[in-house]
Amino acid sequence: MPSSWTHVDKDTTTGLPIMLAQNIIVGTALTVGAIACSGFYLAMIGNVASLVPWALVVTFVAVAYTYVVGFALLWCVESFTLRMRDKFKPIAYGVVGAIGYGVWGLFVMTSVMNSLDQPLNGVVLANGDVAAIAVNYAAFGFIATMLGQAHAPKLAARRKTAIGLLVAQIALAALGLVCAVMMFSALGR
């Protein structure tokens, strides 16, 4: 348990920060969830793109959350749970993850989807679709963040596995960014 906000817990053998391991687990879980649900999201906007590029775009949105907002939320929930009993910590982490990723899905993912759907079909997401996306993102955020808190020390002890997962996420996100740029630049023509 950190004694101050500047202290970083690390695995004693590999030196990998525990919070980085948490974020890698969160990113992996959200990447798998994004790929699994990409067809669901694509159907909501009328199949305006091919599935594989769209899955990469959705993966980019998930990984962007993980390494931009996710680190900040992990730091906040770490401070919040310093004096909490260990058996309640995964639940607290999960709740913060559900709120953070649910809000991200509500604002960011629905904006991305509307940005494609409105120019191509002339419609935007219905309120029920927006609610379904927010609930879906909240559920994945809860599960991913809870898993990150519960299994981070195990992953921190396996440096090569952690780095491999991180590289895979970044590679998929980079491909997703390229696909997003190509999709939105095609709309501008």
Image (tube, rainbow, N blue to C red):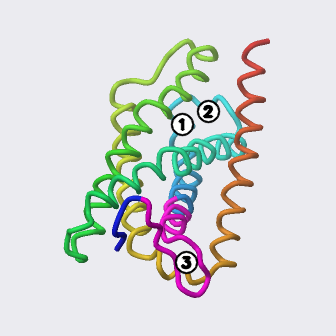
Quadrant holding the C terminus: top right
Q: Tags 1 and 2 in contact by the CB under 8 Å rule?
A: yes
Question: Going 44% across and 38% down the picture, which residue do you hit?
Answer: 105
- Which residue type does callout 1 highlight? Ala
Q: Is residue 8 magenta?
A: yes
Whether residue 42 sits left or right of residue 54 in the image: it is: left
Which residue is labeled 2 in the image? 47
Whether residue 22 sits left or right of residue 117 in the image: it is: left
- Residue 145 is situated, as x and y percent measured from the top left of the image, at 40, 61
Whether residue 187 sits left or right of residue 104 in the image: it is: right
Question: Going 44% across and 49% down the picture, which residue do you hit?
Answer: 72
Q: CA distance from mark 2 to mark 3?
A: 40 Å
Q: CA distance from mark 3 to mark 1?
A: 38 Å
- Which residue type does callout 2 highlight? Asn
Which residue is labeled 1 in the image? 43
Q: Nearer the viewer, mark 2 or mark 3?
A: 3
Residue 82's image quarter? bottom left
Q: Secondary structure at mark 2?
A: loop
Q: Secondary structure at mark 1?
A: helix
Q: Secondary structure at mark 3?
A: helix
127 up-or-down from 22: above or below: above
- Residue 156, which numbered label? 3
Give the magenta range: 6-26
Mark 3 vs 1, N-terminal side? 1
- Which residue type does callout 3 highlight? Ala
